[in-house]
Amino acid sequence: MLTSADKRAAFKKLHESGCFIIPNPFDVGSAKALQHLGFKALASTSAGFAWTLGKADNRVTVDDVCDHLTAICAAVDIPVNADFEDGFAHEPDKVAVNVARAVKTGVAGLSIEDYTGDSAKPLFDRALAVDRIKAARQAIDADNSGVLLTGRCEAFLRGQKDLNLVIDRLTAYADAGADCLYAPGISTAEEISAVVKAVQPKPVNLLVGTGPSLKEASALGVRRISIGASLARMAWAGFMKASKEMAEQGTFGEFANGYSGGELNKMFS
């Protein structure tokens, strides 16, 4: 197995050129499967993990997440980036404490977002949001861990589709020490290109659902593609379809579409 330092060095190298997909497993098994398929790095998903605990997104604790990250990092031999939500605190000093804890799980990177959790005022004030990134940066650098910090602006996901606001915040997060920038929800070529240009030479992560392909995103200057909870939703789609068939019809036809148990055993052996 590679050491955490090895994984962190490999993760930084991936961000130096080209564009790569960083898929989001939701448990140890899905993480191992993605490594088996040849992906070079993984990212956790807050929603996907929360659903494995029977909780809604943004309803897990820092204890839950750190245990989850520790398990995934120990299970795979490739870098893992943590969706560390809002740092599980509002105040910068408390964000720093939690980020220092996350670093000890073995992650190669982590993101801090500016979503408050309050729909009435979804984004932290700009100055506070910047201070939270600075605090995360200081916590990462305190022991020279080499963990890559992603600054994340949630505006588009929270109903504030103001590209100027997003660019202003992302450039401020870059200046505050973020190594990679991320604005989930941007989707058009114009939006993506504008963000890439504004923060270059720092890399940009793009959230893709059914949007641009790897080749198209690369042409726009994107360095990293993540998929959020999409794989988790796909897994739940199969589970719910088969379960509803049993509950509503008393039949079991959907099981014919299941993945081969023999292949799963072979992959995990």
Image (spheres, rainbow, N blue to C red):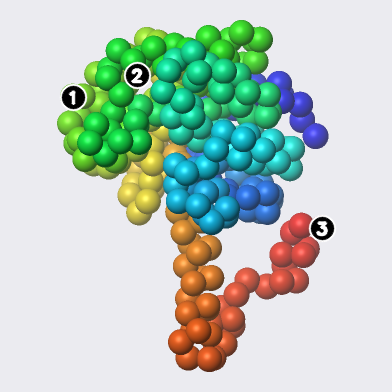
Whole-percent x, y for residue 263 in the image: 72, 67
Q: Quadrant of residue 54?
A: bottom right
Q: What residue sits right under mark 1 in the picture?
A: 164
Mark 1 and mark 2: Cα distance apart in space: 16 Å
Q: Residues within 10 Å of mark 2 (few under 14, many from 20)?
A: many
- Describe residue 122's horizontal placement relative to residue 161 as left or right: right
Q: Quadrant of residue 181?
A: top left
Amino acid beneath label 3: Ser
Q: Quadrant of residue 143?
A: top right
Residue drawn 57% across the image and 18% down it: 97
Q: What residue sits right under mark 2 in the picture?
A: 129
Residue drawn 21% across the image and 40% down it: 159
Give the mark nearest the N terminus, 1 or 3.
1
* Extreme residue toward the bottom, this view: 250
Query: Which mark, by number, is residue 269?
Result: 3
Measured along the vertical axis of the image, is residue 228 above or below residue 66?
below
